[in-house]
Image (cartoon, rainbow, N blue to C red):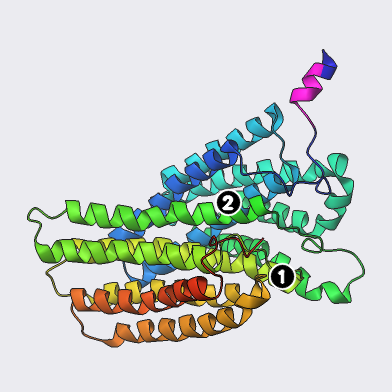
Amino acid sequence: MNLRFRTWWRPARKASDPHDERTVSFLELFYDLVYVVLVAQLAHALTAHLDLKHIGQFVFLFAIVWWSWLNGSWYHEFHGNNDIRTRIFTFLQMFMVAGMAVFAHNALGEGSVQFAFFFGLYQLILSYLWWRLAAHDPIHHIENRPYVIAFTISTFLFFASILVPIPLRFYLWVLAVMISLLQPLIFALLQPKLSRPGPLERLHFSPAFIERFGLFNILVLAEIIVGVVTGLAEHHHLTMSVFAVGGLGLSIAFIMWWLYFDFISHRKPLGTQVAGSSWLYMHLFVSMSIVATGAAVRNVVEHTGEPLEAVVRWALVGAIAVYLLSLVPLMRVISVVNEAKTAYGRASIMVFIIALIITLLGFSKLATLPLLIIIVFLMLVPVVYAVVFWVRVLDAKDLYSHID
């Protein structure tokens, strides 16, 4: 009986076990869905209050949400199994994420205590899982000890924040988030001077782990589509101009998808700590800017026919520019075949220049329709370049045949 139980309640898988052949599981896809709900709450809150203050709050909260998603995904990548233990602990994490989603719309207001409580519980579960590696995978536990210590301190700070008033509560949040986000990067930069291995020393990006980021970006791209549809539904009289603005909003989502999955997706980062950590951190800005674009697009569609407010214009061009600028370093740190290296260098410069031009549109007084037309036209330039390169140089092979 005990042997049969151990078959279904196995210890955490060792990070050294081969896992390059694994695929993204249905459990991981289900796990990502609860984060879609949480991200949607953040997006809706930003849509309702699209100003500088709430944009800053959105950036801060999204960093918390994305970091928690990364940690849950990271643990499953290296130590997850297809057993009862993995499922139960994954479902427990999902319970806490759902609790965070309930209070996310007012997480920096009246819902801050509840949000901190559920996030603290979520981190407590992961802290336990990482701590148990001392028994299940002692080698990986030693390598990740600084990371685990920082994670535990962050958990303690969030629980402690419940006991203190505002604004001290949020200062503790900022400190906790900075410890979590910066610790792996700092350790990676200091690693050449240290004798012990660091948390990114032997970080291995399997195809399934890389695919998780692409799947997550597909899910957050839905926020732009939801924004367009919801914005159109707010209009009692749908005119051609309203449909045109909505179509251009959808086009932005389609182009964002095209750029990411043509240039970035399915490609492993170069085998250095700097490349690996850059690849991870840039995905934070990619996902964040997509969601912010969705909030801006919804505002634009809802107010079609009205003068475009400066804050909405800046939110739109700013979010798109951040997205494009995030792709630039990603193009520089991924592994591509020799035939594509020159094209990637040119494309990264092209995308950088286009991001700057789109940013400058924030100073313009253009109406909604011409502004969107110019943005879509500019974003299409690297898309066309990628298609021409694919057809001429790669001889019309499968889009991803040159990246494995």
Amino acid type of the residue that numbered disc 1 sits on in the rendered structure: Leu
Give the foreground label among 1 and 2: 1
* Residue denoted by label 2: 69
Label tally: 2
Residue 302 picture location, percent across and down: 19, 61
Q: Residue furthest right?
A: 195
Which of the numbered marks, if any, corresponds to residue 270? 1
Q: Is residue 389 above or below residue 15?
A: below
Prevailing SS of the magenta stretch = helix
Callout 2 amino acid: Trp
Name the residue located 47 percent from the left edge and 63 percent from the top edge. 288
- The residue segment tinted magenta is 4-10
Residue drawn at the location 73% of the way across and 49% of the way down: 20
Dot 1 surroundings within 10 Å: few (below 14), some, or many (20 or more)? some
Quarter holding the N terminus is top right
- Nearer the observer, 68 or 157: 68
Vertical relation: 365 (above or below) 327: below
